[in-house]
Image (cartoon, rainbow, N blue to C red):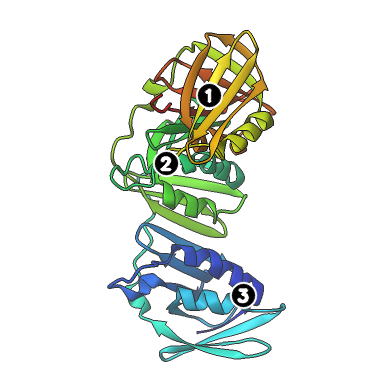
């Protein structure tokens, strides 16, 4: 195999493709590598860790077709060190590959590419729709951080993607907080639901371009494809909790505050939170204020209030301040609503005028 490729394009492609190579030691060495295929379909880079996989096209000139597999780590380190612009030549012979640039050459040992598995592509489609990559990344990226990092319950470590009535939802929860993001897709009439492991979803969202993406899934796999690449991920087949049951239908107290004010006070209070990172959130109807208090026996205590429009009952609840802060960077509205459903019951945070995003957080013991 002999191919010629732009240095910057190869470096960028290797950086994204190597994300999907196996990082740990494995009995199948090629899983730690990137397979380069040069043939009738052009030049492609492939990698998989059996959880996720990628097939990415790059521009270049094929002087002699062929297939070769190289260590993903080694190839990434070499291509990331390239300076300047221009073409490079990659030439495969025997068990080595020689990469020649305008200023030097490197010789790499190859891996046995014959063992590289076929990337699965869903044939029977439980879901099949098109969406812009920018919308898809916003949909999943908004909620993925709320998935559980534990592998004890795989369903809680996943992002639920579902559609009904032309609306696609993404949901994630770790049982302490929950995020739901909705977008409307004109012309989408199908109904479906599938679970993507959150780590897989984040890797895919960091790689997808902003252009239109076709999404296809069956019972076990989901594929995201566009002219320049295809990404695949396995799905979680365990049923997702009926999360709609824990979203309150009514509230005892509602407060509207400026998002930047709430964020600023939380940041100050965090200095005084205890080892459980607890802060107390109080709603005062008469004074039209929301008060945030924190106490740490080793540091001291703080109490600060912000102006608010408060309706309902006066109530005080305790929360992990990180969970209160988490949704604020995801909300674009200048004002937010804090809706309390009672002692020991969830607090719901939304952006004023934005029905597309809901964040729910459970209180701590008083």
Residue closest to the eye, 50 or 347? 347
Q: How many marks?
A: 3
Residue 236: tell me if it is visible: yes
Q: CA distance from mark 1 to mark 2?
A: 24 Å
Quarter holding residue 357:
top right
Residue closest to the eye, 278 or 179? 278
In the displayed structure, 52 sits above or below 1; it is above
Q: Secondary structure at mark 3?
A: loop
Callout in the foreground (3, 2): 2
Residue closest to the eye, 289 or 231? 289
Judging by the rendered image, the residue that carries numbered circle 3 is: 60
Q: Secondary structure at mark 1?
A: strand
What residue sits 36% from the left and 64% below the top? Answer: 118
Horizontal relation, residue 240 to residue 36: left or right: left
What residue sits 55% from the left and 67% below the top? Answer: 15
Residue closest to the eye, 350 or 205? 350
Q: Crowdedness of circle 1 by 10 Å Cα count: few (<14), some, many (20+)?
A: many
Circles 3, 2 touching at the beta carbon (< 8 Å): no
In the displayed structure, 86 sits above or below 249; it is below
Residue 8: % across, % down: 65, 72
Earlier in the chain: of badge 3 and badge 1, it is 3
Residue 42: % across, % down: 55, 71
Residue 312: % across, % down: 55, 8
Judging by the rendered image, the residue that carries numbered circle 1 is: 281
What residue sits 51% from the left and 36% below the top? Answer: 273
Where does the C terminus fall, quadrant-wise? top left
Q: Secondary structure at mark 2?
A: loop
Horizontal relation, residue 155 to residue 210: left or right: left
Earlier in the chain: of badge 1 and badge 2, it is 2
Horizontal relation, residue 129 to residue 220: left or right: right
Judging by the rendered image, the residue that carries numbered circle 2 is: 147
Q: CA distance from mark 3 to mark 1?
A: 59 Å
């Amino acid at each position: 195999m002999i191919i010629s490729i732009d240095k910057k394009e190869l470096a960028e492609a290797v950086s994204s493709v190597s994300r999907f190579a196996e990082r740990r030691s494995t009995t199948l060495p090629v899983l730690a590598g990137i397979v380069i295929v040069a043939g009738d379909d052009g030049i492609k880079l492939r990698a998989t860790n059996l959880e996720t996989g990628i097939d990415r096209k790059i521009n270049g000139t094929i002087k002699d077709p062929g297939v070769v597999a190289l260590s993903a780590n080694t190839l990434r380190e070499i291509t990331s060190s390239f300076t300047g612009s221009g073409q490079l030549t990659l030439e495969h012979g025997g068990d080595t590959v020689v990469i020649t640039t305008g200023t030097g050459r490197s010789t790499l040992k190859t891996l046995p590419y014959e063992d590289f598995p076929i990337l699965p592509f869903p044939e029977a489609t439980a879901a099949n729709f098109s969406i812009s990559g920018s919308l898809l990344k916003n949909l999943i990226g908004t909620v993925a951080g709320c998935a559980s990092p534990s592998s004890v319950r795989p369903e809680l470590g996943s992002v639920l993607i579902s559609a009904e009535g032309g609306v696609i939802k993404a949901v994630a929860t770790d049982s302490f907080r929950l995020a739901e993001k909705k977008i409307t897709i004109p012309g989408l009439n199908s109904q479906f639901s599938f679970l993507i492991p959150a780590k897989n979803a984040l890797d895919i969202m960091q790689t997808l371009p902003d252009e239109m993406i076709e999404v296809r899934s069956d019972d076990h796999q989901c594929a995201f494809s566009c002219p320049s690449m295809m990404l695949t991920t396995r799905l979680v087949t365990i049923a997702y909790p009926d999360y709609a049951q824990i979203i309150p239908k009514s509230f005892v107290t509602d407060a509207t505050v400026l998002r930047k004010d709430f964020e600023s006070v939380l940041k100050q209070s965090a200095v005084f939170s205890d080892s459980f990172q607890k802060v107390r959130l109080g709603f005062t109807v008469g004074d039209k204020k929301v008060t945030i208090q924190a106490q740490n026996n080793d540091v001291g205590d703080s109490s600060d209030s912000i102006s608010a429009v408060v309706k309902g009952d006066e109530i005080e609840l305790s929360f992990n301040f990180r969970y209160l802060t988490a949704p604020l960077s995801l909300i674009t509205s200048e004002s937010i609503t804090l809706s309390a459903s009672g002692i020991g019951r969830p607090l719901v945070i939304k952006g004023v005028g934005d029905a597309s995003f809901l964040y729910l957080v459970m209180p701590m013991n008083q």
